[in-house]
């Protein structure tokens, strides 16, 4: 999502390799969201053989990339595909669905919503064994919820051996924007909302003029959309250490409205908890420590 100046170098310092990048989504054409693209594309080694890269973004992105490539004598080859996005569904495969919505910024800016598709419930191997079903290819059929007839004539419904389907997770990315209903709509029921918070609450006037969000706007979007976790990003340098208002103030302002708020920083990572039904059981079944809870894939709220 987005590619500001220096992304390529930060990637080299991270655990992600540029060769792993398969799709890039650009929200809008402002430089702090696009200046890193050419360097990143160049470092992906598109000249060789490998998987294609699809870039999604607003109108103008294609012209920008093609012109920059032309005047810097760079050849994208045939592996780079640039897609101009419109609000609605823009990508779908077996695992994910990605859609976008127009936000409210000085130029057209899109928020993105990534939805993981629901997965079949966990197959209960112990139960299958206790019923005397011999392990083998038959387990594969049962896992898919099929009805199978055993050699002894018993008919087994795979669904009886599977837990409830696991609801797919949703991650929503909203930047740049002033508070808008489209962001609330896009973020509905998300596991994680990543939302810009350029300004502190007291600088709301500036936020409206520049069409950016305050910490409290981001928190209101999270609250109204009923998300599980808000991660704020895109802070103005005016809140850097040594200034009267700091990033901790922005965090406190947001938490007064939406307590599950975190601030993003370089190399910050957040594991989106799975939505397995059995996790609810595990909570009641005595998860004693945060570590245990994390291992069980549960959402753990840190106090920091
Ligand atoms: Zn912008």
Image: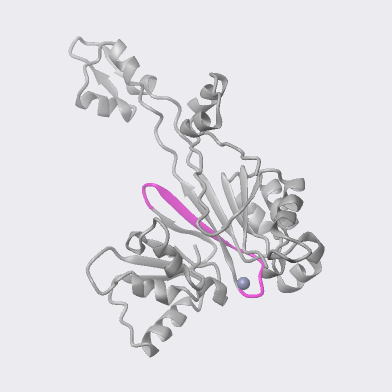
> What is the number of callouts on the image?
0
Answer with the quadrant where ligand 1 appears in the image.
bottom right
Check residue 57 for magenta coloring: no
Q: Nearer the viewer, residue 37 or 67?
A: 37
* Rendered location of residue 180, percent (x, y): 70, 60
- The residue at the far bottom in this view is 71
Asked if residue 105 lies in the magenta stretch, the reply is: yes
Q: Is residue 122 above or below residue 213?
A: above
**Percent coordinates x, y for residue 195 in the rendering:** 62, 57
- Point out residue 25 in the picture as x, y percentages from the top left corner: 47, 64
Q: Residue at x 62, y 66 (%)?
A: 176
Q: Residue at x 69, y 55 (%)?
A: 218
- Residue 204 is situated, as x and y percent measured from the top left of the image, at 79, 65
Magenta-tinted stretch: 93-107
Quarter location, residue 240? bottom right
Q: Residue furthest left?
A: 151
- Image quadrant where residue 79 sits: bottom left
How is the rendered protein coloured? one colour
120, 156: nearer the viewer: 120
Q: Is residue 167 above or below residue 90?
A: above
Quadrant in the rendering for residue 191: top right
Q: Residue at x 41, y 75 (%)?
A: 39
Quadrant location of the C terminus? top right
Asked if residue 64 lies left or right of residue 151, the reply is right
Residue at x 55% of width, y 71% of height:
28
Q: Is residue 162 left or right of residue 7?
A: left
């Amino acid at each position: 999502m987005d590619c500001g100046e220096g992304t390529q170098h930060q990637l080299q310092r991270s655990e992600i390799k540029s060769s792993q990048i398969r799709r890039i989504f650009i929200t809008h054409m402002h430089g702090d969201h696009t200046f890193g693209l050419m360097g990143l594309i160049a470092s992906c080694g598109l000249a060789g053989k490998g998987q294609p890269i699809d870039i999604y973004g607003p109108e103008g992105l294609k012209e920008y990339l093609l012109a920059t490539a032309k005047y810097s004598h760079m050849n994208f080859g045939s592996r780079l595909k640039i897609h101009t996005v419109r609000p609605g569904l823009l990508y779908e495969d077996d695992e994910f669905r990605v859609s976008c919505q127009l936000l409210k910024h000085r130029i057209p800016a899109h928020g993105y919503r990534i939805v993981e598709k629901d997965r079949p419930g966990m197959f209960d191997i112990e139960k299958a064994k206790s019923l005397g079903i011999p392990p083998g290819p038959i387990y594969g059929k049962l896992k898919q919820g099929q009805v199978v007839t055993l050699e002894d004539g018993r008919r087994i419904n795979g669904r009886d051996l599977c837990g409830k389907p696991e609801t797919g997770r949703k991650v929503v990315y909203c930047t740049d924007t002033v508070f808008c209903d489209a962001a609330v709509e896009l973020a509905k029921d998300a596991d994680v909302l990543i939302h810009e918070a350029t300004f502190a609450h007291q600088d709301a006037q500036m936020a409206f003029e520049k069409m950016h969000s305050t910490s409290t706007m981001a928190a209101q979007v999270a609250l109204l959309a009923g998300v599980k976790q808000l991660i704020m990003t895109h802070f103005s340098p005016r809140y850097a250490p040594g200034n009267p208002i700091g990033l901790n103030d922005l965090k406190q302002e947001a938490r007064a409205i939406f307590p599950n708020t975190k601030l993003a920083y370089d190399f910050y990572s957040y594991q989106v908890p799975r939505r397995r039904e059995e996790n609810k059981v595990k909570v009641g079944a005595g998860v004693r420590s945060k570590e245990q809870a994390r291992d069980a894939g549960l959402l753990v709220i840190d106090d920091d």
